[in-house]
C-alpha cells in the first residue's frame, strides 16, 4: 500500500492545513485490514524518494495506491508514475488523470461543455478577468484538495474582496487561483466505481449544513467538525430528475477524465437548480469515519467491501489474479 503518512507536527511558517490530504495511521490500518480480509499480504510503503527502491526490493505483485505525493499539480501523479516505471500494476487512475484532476481548471476544461461547470476564471498572478464574473464568487487554490485553502471567507461578495483573497491565496499556496461564481444550491457528491462500460454510480449523497446556514461551504473548518456541523443525505433531497442528471454527469465526467477503478465527484446546484461539476477526486479519502466515499456507500456495503472492491476492480482491469 503506497501512501503518504500525515506528519505529527506542522513546521512553523506553513499553513495549518498543509498536510490535510495525507492519511492518518487509522486510515492506513483500516485499509490494510480490509485488504488482508481478501487473504493477501499487505505492507505499507511510504511514497517518498526511496519508494522506487522499496517497491522493487519488496517483491510486490500489486500496488494499492492512496499516495498523495509532494509538490504541486503533479504530486498525485508521481507515485503512480513510479509504479509505471517499475512495471508494477496499481489501483486507480493513471498519472495523466491524477494530474489533470488535481488541476481544477484543467479538469473543468476537460469535462465541459458536455458536463456543465460554473462560470470562472483562472488567475496566474494578476487579477484580470474578475470584473466579468457575477458576485458572490468562490475563491480557491487551483491545485489543492481536501478543502485546503477553502474557508468560510472563501465566498466573497465584491471584486475588491476577490482581488485581496486571490492575492493572499496565491502567496500562501504558491499556485494559481480559481475564481468561480458561487453556486448557491445543494451540494452533491457522487461515488463511481468500475471501468469502461461497467463504471457505475455507487451512490449520490447530499452534504448539507446542520443549521441551513447560508451560504454553505464544505470548508476545512466544517469538514474537521463534520459530526456536529454536517448532515449527509443518501439519496440527496432533490427531485428524481435532478438526481438522475447528476449521476449521468458523474459517469460522463469519469469517462472524460479517464478515471479508473474508483473516483468521487463533487457537484453543486446553481440558482436555477441545475447541477454543475466542481471537481473529481480519483484518490477519494478512505478514512473509515470521515471519508465521504465511505459515508455515501454505508447503506450499500461495509467498509471492508468498499476497499476490497477497489482492488478487485483493479485486478479485473489488469488481468491479475488473486493467489
Ligand atoms: N463554485 C462554487 N460554488 C459554491 N461552493 C463551492 C464552489 N466551489 C467550491 N465550493 C465549496 O467548496 C468546497 C470545496 O471545493 P472543491 O472544489 O470541492 O475543492 P476540494 O478539492 O478542496 O474539495 C465544495 O465542497 C463546496 O462546498
Ligand atoms: Mg471537493
Image (spheres, rainbow, N blue to C red):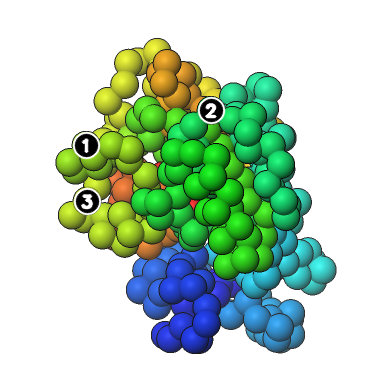
Badge 1 density bin: few <14, some 14–19, many ≥20, Cα 10 Å: few
In the image, taking residue 21 as reference, residue 60 lies left or right, namely: right
* Along the viewing direction, whichever of 157 and 115 lies nearer the viewer: 157
Q: Which residue is mark 3?
A: 229
Question: Which badge, 2 or 3, comes first in the chain's sequence?
Answer: 2
**Circle on res. 212:** 1
Q: Find residue 150 and report its horizontal and vertical position in percent.
A: 45, 54
How many marks the image carries: the answer is 3
Foreground pick, 227 / 139:
139
Cα distance in 3D space between marks 2 and 3: 29 Å
Whether residue 67 appears in this view of the structure is yes
What is the distance, in whole Å, between disc 3 and disc 1 at their CAs? 10 Å
Q: Quadrant of the C terminus?
A: bottom right
The image quadrant of residue 199 is top right
Please name the residue that numbered disc 2 is placed on.
Answer: 134
**Sequence-earlier tag: 3 or 1:** 1
Q: Secondary structure at mark 3?
A: helix
Residues tagged 2 and 3 counted as in contact (Cβ below 8 A): no
Q: CA distance from mark 2 to mark 1?
A: 23 Å
Q: Is residue 305 visible?
A: no
Residue 159 percent coordinates (x, y): 55, 40
Amino acid at each position: 500500500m503506497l501512501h503518504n503518512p500525515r506528519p505529527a507536527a506542522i513546521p512553523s511558517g506553513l499553513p495549518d492545513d498543509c498536510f490535510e490530504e495525507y492519511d492518518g495511521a487509522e486510515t492506513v490500518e483500516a485499509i490494510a485490514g480490509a485488504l488482508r480480509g481478501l487473504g493477501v499480504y499487505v505492507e505499507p510503503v511510504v511514497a517518498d524518494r526511496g519508494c522506487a527502491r522499496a517497491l522493487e526490493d519488496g517483491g510486490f505483485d500489486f500496488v494499492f495506491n492512496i499516495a498523495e505525493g509532494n509538490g504541486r499539480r503533479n504530486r498525485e501523479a508521481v507515485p503512480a508514475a513510479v509504479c509505471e516505471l517499475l512495471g508494477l500494476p496499481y489501483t486507480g487512475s493513471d498519472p495523466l488523470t491524477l494530474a489533470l484532476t488535481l488541476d481544477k481548471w484543467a479538469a473543468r476544461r476537460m469535462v465541459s461543455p458536455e458536463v456543465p461547470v460554473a462560470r470562472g476564471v483562472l488567475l496566474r498572478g494578476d487579477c484580470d478577468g474578475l470584473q466579468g464574473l457575477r458576485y458572490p464568487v468562490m475563491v480557491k487554490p487551483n491545485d489543492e484538495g481536501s478543502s485546503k485553502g477553502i474557508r468560510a471567507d472563501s465566498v466573497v461578495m465584491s471584486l475588491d474582496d476577490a482581488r485581496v483573497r486571490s492575492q493572499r491565496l496565491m502567496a500562501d499556496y504558491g499556485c494559481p487561483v480559481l475564481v468561480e461564481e458561487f453556486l448557491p444550491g445543494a451540494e452533491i457528491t457522487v461515488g463511481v466505481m468500475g471501468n469502461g462500460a461497467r463504471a457505475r454510480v455507487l451512490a449520490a449523497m447530499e452534504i448539507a449544513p446542520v443549521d441551513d446556514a447560508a451560504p454553505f461551504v464544505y470548508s476545512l473548518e466544517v469538514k474537521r467538525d463534520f459530526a456536529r456541523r454536517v448532515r449527509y443525505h443518501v439519496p440527496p433531497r432533490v427531485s428524481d430528475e435532478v438526481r438522475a442528471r447528476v449521476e449521468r454527469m458523474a459517469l460522463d465526467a469519469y469517462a472524460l477524465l479517464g478515471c479508473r477503478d474508483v473516483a468521487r465527484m463533487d457537484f453543486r446546484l446553481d440558482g436555477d437548480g441545475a447541477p454543475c461539476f466542481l471537481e473529481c477526486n480519483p484518490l477519494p479519502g478512505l478514512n473509515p469515519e470521515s471519508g465521504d466515499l465511505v459515508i455515501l456507500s454505508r447503506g450499500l456495503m461495509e467498509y471492508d467491501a468498499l476497499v476490497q472492491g477497489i482492488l478487485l476492480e483493479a485486478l479485473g482491469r489488469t488481468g491479475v489474479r488473486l493467489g
